[in-house]
Image (cartoon, grey):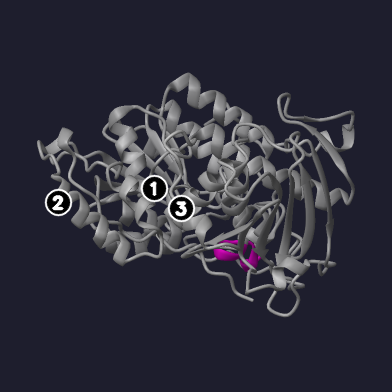
Amino acid sequence: MKLQRDPLPSRLISLPSAHSTGFRPSRRHFLKSAAALAAASTLPKWFLEESVVAATKPLAANDQPAIALVGCGGMGRGDAKNASRFGKVVALCDVDDGQLAEAKKQWPDATTFKDFRKLMERDDIHVVICGTVDHWHTLISIAAMRAGKDVYCEKPLTLTIDEGKHLVRIAKETKRVLQTGSQQRSDKNFRMACELVRNGRIGKLKHISVFLPAGRREGPFSKAPVPEGFDWDMWLGQTPRVDFVKERAHVTFRYWWEYSGGTMTDWGAHHNDIALWSVGLERSGPVEIDGKALAQMIPDGFSAVSEYDLRYTYANGVMHSCQSTTADTWYGAIAKQDGQRNGVRFEGIDGWIWVTRGKIEASNPEFLIQALPSTAERLYVSNDHMGNFFECVRSRKQPVCEAEIGHRSATVCHLGVIAIRLGRKLKWDPAKELFVDDKEANSFLAREMRKPWSYETV
């Protein structure tokens, strides 16, 4: 099974900003734009009309931030292309000459680097996009913020919970803008689902079911010569030194515990983030986790467990299950209904809502059609994830998925990984960010970094 990277969110219709252009939309213009959106979407008109007036403001023509891309693989290049709507890509960095060459085709005038620390020395760069493998996200983001640059960092934001705590602290100290690439926060379907759940549209919330694609169970793999132009030692960074195995690098890095958390942190950083948002605990987390592996991995092959079953419990009594699914076997009875195999299902005492990319459904269609009252709790509106980031670069406001939110969403995934690896129930204190009376579990909160790398050496 070969997983594809997440597609970029499609462009959405937006109105020019009165602040940036002097344009004030008439009611006729407003309704025409809302109708255009409704025609292109299955979302109800009441929700779309409210979203149009809060659409992302374009950057002024004379205010073009200089952008640097660190990590020039397919995801990084996609992010940089998306960002180029708002600024100019002036620098590229990757430890692989092949990746650099591909990026250079898109931005021939950009300066290239193989060491991100050299890039950070440039004082004309305003924004750093971190599109690297997961284990480099934190150190590169820290280096960029300390160098006075704002950061768009791909999800999952961190490799460990301890990394997230450092990242949140440094973001506050430097007052830099950091947007986590959990772009479902800027998707109308997911935001509407969370608003409806938080406002009791399905009654008291009882259970959240998250379904993620299963990982890959392959191996054993053999070591091979390091490709020419690929700095393997730099790619490994703070992780343990090992011989080069081509399956460890590039797209399949995510199936190794050393560099990622399998699909639990890859897709889980999206769907578990939505679960937290729906219960209003995006700055907190669960109090209990119970998990187990459902597959035995092959020695000398991918190490991140490919299939798993997890249960989270929140202090308010809401249960949150997270299960891997495959084409042949879907774990959990709910996953067998209506093809609901990759997404989030909210169950309340009065019904359910199902949301995934490009689709939102409910047990009662009226749940989606009926407008929320004027007194309802409304959530942060962002209809363009990259646009929201650049708007915040200008305004110095916090984006929809800022550092602490990205950290807490990644934490839920890391907690799941730790429970899977230990194979037992764990108690978690989300305020102290520690396991309760569990020395063994707490030993998984951080990983020793290989010298010379540390939080202070970047």
Inspect this view and state whether residue 262 appears.
no
- Mark 1 in CB contact with mark 3 (< 8 angstroms): no
The three-letter amino acid code for the residue at tag 3 is Gln
Q: Quadrant of residue 58?
A: top left
Q: Secondary structure at mark 3?
A: loop
Q: 198 or 129, which is in the foreground?
A: 198
With 110 as the anchor, is 227 left or right in this view?
right
Provide the residue designation for mark 2.
28
The three-letter amino acid code for the residue at tag 1 is His
Q: Quadrant of residue 179?
A: top left
Question: How busy is the neighbourhood of tag 1: few (under 14 within 10 Å), some, or many (20 plus)?
Answer: many
Which of the two discs, 1 and 2, labels the residue nearer the N terminus? Answer: 2
Provide the residue designation for mark 3.
370
Mark 1 against mark 3, which lies toward the viewer?
A: 3
Q: 200 or 150, which is in the foreground?
A: 200
Question: How busy is the neighbourhood of tag 2: few (under 14 within 10 Å), some, or many (20 plus)?
Answer: few
Q: Quadrant of residue 347?
A: bottom right
Q: Which residues are magenta?
A: 245-252
The three-letter amino acid code for the residue at tag 2 is Arg
Check if residue 258 falls in the magenta segment. Answer: no
Please give the name of the residue rendered at 47% of the width and 61% of the height, measured from the top-left corner.
229
- Residue 116 locus on image (x, y percent): 44, 42
Provide the residue designation for mark 1.
385
Looking at the image, residue 343 lies above or below residue 237: below
